[in-house]
Image (tube, grey):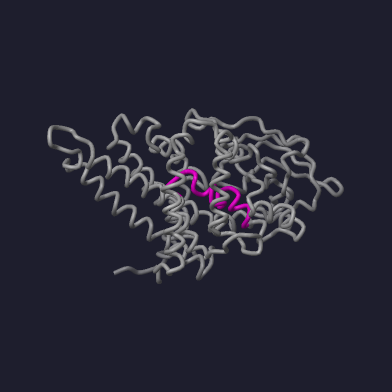
Amino acid sequence: MDFSVSEKMQTILGMIDEFVDKELIPLEPEFVTRSFADLLPVVEEKRNMVRQMELWAPNHPQAYGGMGLSLTEHALVSEALGRSPLGHFVFGCQAPDAGNIEILDLFGTDAQKEKYLRPLVEGKIRSCFSMTEVDMPGSNPVMLETTAVADGDDYVINGQKWYSSSADGAEFAIVMAVTNPEAPAYLQSSMIIVPTNTPGFNLVRNIPVMGHSGDDYFSHAEILYQSCRVPKENLLGPEGHGFVIAQERLGPGRIHHCMRWIGICNRAFDLMCARAVARTIAPGKKLSTKQIVQAWIAESAADIQAARLMVLHAAWMIENVGAKEARKEISLIKFQVAGVMQQVIDRALQVHGGLGMTDDTILAFLYRHERAARIYDGADEVHKVSVARRILRDYEGKVVR
């Protein structure tokens, strides 16, 4: 395994780091205190700057205007962009659009690609992914109550979804719904494109997350589908293959997430160290002289480096043997990196004391919005159980001396 970074990628990452430092981090005080919709004109200026730098949509297909970077290359980009909450959006590789683009590229028809994929990659529209349901376990995607019943040339969709991230202002949703209730569990659901202006698509609210409901792209919606009728041509892939498509989406998507989390770790670590060496706690004595703070810094550095190498290894596995063979590695990074990120943010906030609880730094924003990392894309506990079972199967009947 060779994790060396090519000269081309070193140049790209250097440009991204400089852009994040000079153009995005200075926007954060306004970002955490204002409506995102109010900030959009400035954000769009930054997006145009990225387009002019030819760094737009780094992981998306070149045929549709992206850079076409490999999974491992984009993992490095995601780490660099993760240092600011605005990074991925400004560079056109934000979730959930990134995952939806992968789905459309792999499973979309030519007509669907022209209508939805091309403008999505170009950043002219946004989308959302509508799978999680209020009363169903999000970690078990085969358990769904939302139905899409065939009626002539249409599907009629009924159900309630929530945590449909970024639905506020989205042009369309990719909805996971039961189309084949009599089929085996893993072949019951399908993915269907639903334009958000379709009658029966009802955005009920942006869900408050730890007291902040957000707006526009930075929001999580509850949606009611009430006799929402769309043509069967909006089906993605074969009918009944919703779970299969979801698995295709989740594997590489976790690399994107985990490297973004490493970027967040790097930002929190930098803030923690800078605060420790600058904060006076007694005449002539800095916070950095406290051994417990030194221990937090050393442990955080080790944790971040270990987590980073785990993610790069998982990305290498996906590229070389496929997501199915890399299931263990994908599950390992999901819970490990989420836990490391939460601990590093918590340590950084603790080092900042009362300042860390305010929005005068980005730490409070990260603390309240990234706690969900241990829940979405499957709760950590589910991944731990899955990995343990897979490991233990290899020991059945095995003699260990």
Foreground: 60 or 350?
Answer: 60
Residue 210: where, in percent of width, then height? Answer: 47, 30
Residue 111 appears in the picture as rendered: yes
- State whether residue 375 is above or below residue 245: above
Query: Residue at the location (69% across, 56% down)?
Result: 118
Query: Residue at the location (81% across, 48% down)?
Result: 231
Q: Quadrant of residue 206?
A: top right
**Residue 18 shown in magenta:** no
Residue 243 appears in the picture as rendered: no
Residue 399: where, in percent of width, then height? Answer: 35, 69
Foreground: 154 or 273?
Answer: 273
Foreground: 259 or 333?
Answer: 259
Q: Is residue 45 left or right of residue 25?
A: right
Q: Quadrant of residue 370?
A: top left
- State whether residue 333 is above or below residue 316: above
Residue 277: where, in percent of width, then height? Answer: 22, 42
Query: Residue at the location (53% across, 67% down)?
Result: 322
Foreground: 232 or 172?
Answer: 172
**Residue 99 shown in magenta:** yes
The C terminus lies in quadrant:
bottom left
Residue at the limit of the structure toward the left, as seen here: 284
Badge count = 0
The N terminus lies in quadrant:
bottom left
Magenta stretch? 82-102
Residue 191: where, in percent of width, then height? Answer: 69, 51
Query: Residue at the location (36% across, 41% down)?
Result: 345
Q: Is residue 234 left or right of residue 266?
A: right
